[in-house]
Image (cartoon, rainbow, N blue to C red):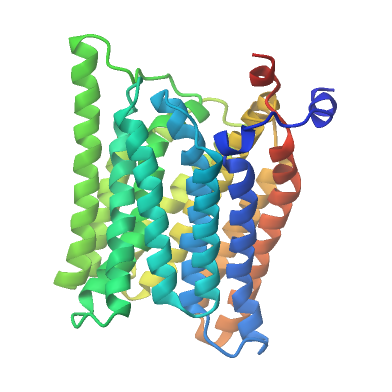
Amino acid sequence: MALQTASRRRLPAGTIPAEPFRILFPLGMLIGVSGVSLWPLYFSGLHKFYPGIMHARLMIEGFMGAFIFGFLGTAMPRLTGTKPLSRIELTSMIVLLLVATGLHIGHQHGSGDAVFLLLLLFFAAQMGRRFLQRTDQLPPTFVLVALGFANAIAGAALLVGGAMGVQDLRWPALGLLLLYQGFILYLVLGVGGFLLPRFLGLPARSEMPDGAEASTAWKRRALFAAATGFVLLASFVLEVFAAIPKGAGTLRFLAAAVFLAAEIPFHRSSGGGVTIIRSLRLGLILLLLGLLFPVLWPMQRVAGLHLVFIGGFTLITLTVATRVVLGHSGLAHLTTAPLPFLRMAAVLLFIAAFLRVAGDFQWALRGRLLDFASYSWMLAAGIWSWRVLPKVRLPDLEETAA
C-alpha cells in the first residue's frame, strides 16, 4: 500500500540536487555494465583492442565514482548540517563524469584522467566548503574519507603526469594503486566505520563529542583512522618503490583487518537472516580475502584485485546503495526484510569473482572464464537495477510530510 501511495506522488522540487544518488546511481550502473561488457566484446572479436585500461577506468572512475559521488553528495550536507548540492553543482559533476567516461571510451585515457581529476577537485571543494560551514561534527572515521579523496586526487594527477611523459614510471604505477585501490578502500573503511555498524544492528557509538570524555574518545578514533590510512599509504609506496608485493600486501591486509575488527565487528552483528546484513558480511569477508591474496600468491596480484573489486567493493556498494534507495523512497521497512533480488545479486557477484580469479590460473580457459564472469556480473547488475533503480523516482513520504 505504501509503495502504491508513493508511486502516485512526484518528487518535490529540488529533491534530485539534494539527493544526487537518484540520478548518479543509475548513471553509474550504465557505465559499469558498459565497462564489463568490453570483455565479451573483445573475446568475441567485435572489439579488436585489448580493453584492460578502458575497462579499469570505466569501473573505477565511472561506475564506482558515480556511486561515491551520489552517496557522499547526499550524505555530506546532512552530516554537516549545511545546504544540499545546488542544481548547478550537480549538473557540473554529471557533465565532468560523462566527459571523462567518453574520453576513456575514445581511448584518450590521459585526457579522461585529467577531466576526472577536475571532477575530484570540484567535488572536494564543494564538500570542503560545507565542512568549514558545518554545524555538526563529522564521524571520526571520516578522516579516511578525506584521505581517500587525497589518494584519488594524487593518483589521478600521477596518471596525468605519466600520460605527459614522466620518465620515472614508478610514479604512474603508484598513481594506479592510489586511484584503483586507495580511493575505494579508504572510503569503504571510512564510511563503513560510521554506517555499517548501524546496518549490521550493532550498538550505536556517539559521533558528536559531548564533554571532555566524549571529545577524547572522538579524537582517539580519528587518530586511529588516520594511522590506518597512513599505514595503507605506506603499503602502496612499498609495493612500488621497494618492490616487495608480499610485504606490502601483508601490511595492507593487517591494517584493514585491524580497523574492521575495531570499528565494524561484523562477526558480532545481530539479525543474521537479514539479506542486507548477510550481503555486507560476505562483501567484507571477500574484501579481506582479496587483500590477503597477494600475500599467498604474490604473482597473482591482478586476480586478488578482482576479488577485492567484484566480491568486496561491488557487493558492498550495491548493498549500501540498496539501503540508501529504500531509506529515501518511503520503503525503509524493507531494509530489515528478506530481499531475494539482493541475495541473488550477491550470489552472482560471488560467482563472477570466482570465475575472474580462476581465469588468471587457467590460461587455456581464460577467455571463456572471463566471458562467464562478465555475464554473471551483468546479470547481477540487471537484477539489482530492475528491483532497486525504479525506486529512485519515489519520494520519502516522511520528509515530504515534514
Q: Quadrant of the N terminus?
A: top right
Which residue extends farthest top? 211
User: Measuring 69% from the left and 49% from the top, which residue is drawn there?
Assistant: 384
User: Measuring 63% from the left and 76% from the top, which residue is drawn there?
Assistant: 371
Nearer to the camera, 297 or 12: 12
Q: Is residue 275 something that shows in the picture?
A: no
Is residue 116 rendered to the left or right of residue 337?
left
Q: Position of residue 266 (x, y in %)?
A: 44, 34
Is residue 160 rendered to the left or right of residue 402?
left
Is residue 271 rendered to the left or right of residue 255?
right
Q: Position of residue 116 (x, y in %)?
A: 42, 62
User: Measuring 73% from the left and 33% from the top, which residue is drawn there?
Assistant: 394
Nearer to the camera, 299 or 314: 314
Above or below: residue 127 compared with residue 133:
below
Which residue extends farthest left? 242
Q: Is residue 27 something that shows in the picture?
A: yes
Above or below: residue 323 compared with residue 41:
above
The number of callouts visible is 0
Nearer to the camera, 89 or 69: 89
Above or below: residue 244 compared with residue 15:
below
Q: Quadrant of the C terminus?
A: top right
Q: Position of residue 14 (x, y in %)?
A: 62, 32
User: Measuring 56% from the left and 34% from the top, which residue is drawn there?
Assistant: 18
Q: Position of residue 209 (x, y in %)?
A: 27, 16
